[in-house]
Amino acid sequence: MPELPEVETIRRGLANKIVGKTIEKIKIRCKRIVLLPPPREWSSALRNQNIKHISRRGKFLLLSTIDYQLLVHLGMTGQLTYWNKDKHNDKKFFIDPLTGLQKAQQHAVDKHTHISLYFSDGNALHYRDIRQFGKWRLYLVADFKNANEYWNLGMEPLTSQYRWTHFYEKLKKRNTKIKSLLLNQQFVAGLGNIYTDEALFEAGVRPVRRTISLSKIEKTRLFEAIPKVLERGLKYGGTSFQNYLNVNGETGNNQEHLRVYGRSGKTCWQCQEQIIRILVCQRSSHFCPHCQR
Ligand SMILES: [Zn+2]
């Protein structure tokens, strides 16, 4: 699933490409992705809307026009790629082993391309989502205050909103496994399975530990580890384990830099012990039994 570094990489790519463009036509091929309003209302709503701004909160992208807020969640396998009319389509047929894409870049609409935004300058933005867990919601600006899925999000890491006192107070009130708390978007926004495992490794804390058992030093290390692993993910353009792509259709490189996630049976970079994979709250979790206590 695209997490904060992946969604932020997509946001930066989109900001360069579609801010200022006018939507001429929208095509919805899979209705289950579009939560509100009903799909038939989308085309008339978005026609001639100019994209003014693109922001991100947690794993959500927010495309703002004068009249609307378009809130996009990429679910498990969502890909947003930009189609440039001036670039030639890569006709060479291949299946990328990481992403399943059938064309190198500039991939054509295929059976997984569920939404397309066509711009007045002839370029387009395609949304492809194999598992179809993505969620697109369109709000009138005046109704955006009702977007609970957005307003209920917790602290935003990598901003001044992310503060130790706040983190510590919120952590103190919970009695749950730390892995499950970190995945809760109302605690800290933007973490998923990959970056929670990586943050817990950096902090030297096992995913099964209960929050009440953590010492103040462990809590401090965890508070510092979260932005550290997210910054690293951003620096390498996101983690492409399965489907993640940036807006140019390229994979990220952070999978080469992961310490524990996806490395069960392999050697820990820090101590040469074997990384273990276990299930915590139905989610697979990877950790080093020597470096994490
Ligand atoms: Zn280790």
Image (tube, rainbow, N blue to C red):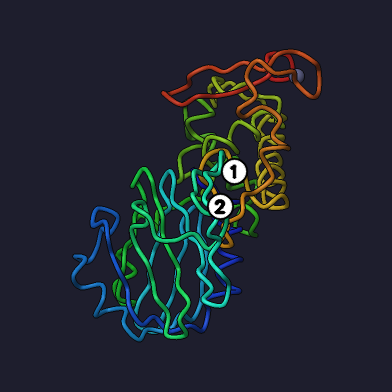
Question: Residue at the location (45% across, 39% down)?
Answer: 184
Q: Position of residue 274 (x, y in %)?
A: 70, 13
Q: Is residue 12 above or below residue 129?
A: below
Q: Are marks 2 and 1 in contact (CB under 8 Å)?
A: yes
Residue type, mark 2 in image: Leu
Q: Position of residue 153 (x, y in %)?
A: 44, 52
Q: Which residue is mark 2?
A: 245
Q: Choose top left, top right, bottom left or bottom right for residue 86.
A: bottom right
Number of marks present in the image shown: 2
Q: Is residue 230 above or below residue 218?
A: below
- Name the element at disc 1: loop
Q: Which residue is mark 1?
A: 240
Question: Residue at the location (54% across, 73% down)?
Answer: 84
150 with respect to 252 (left or right)? left
- Name the element at disc 2: loop
Q: Position of residue 284 (x, y in %)?
A: 50, 24
Nearer to me, 275 or 182: 275
Residue type, mark 1 in image: Ser
221 with respect to 152 (left or right)? right
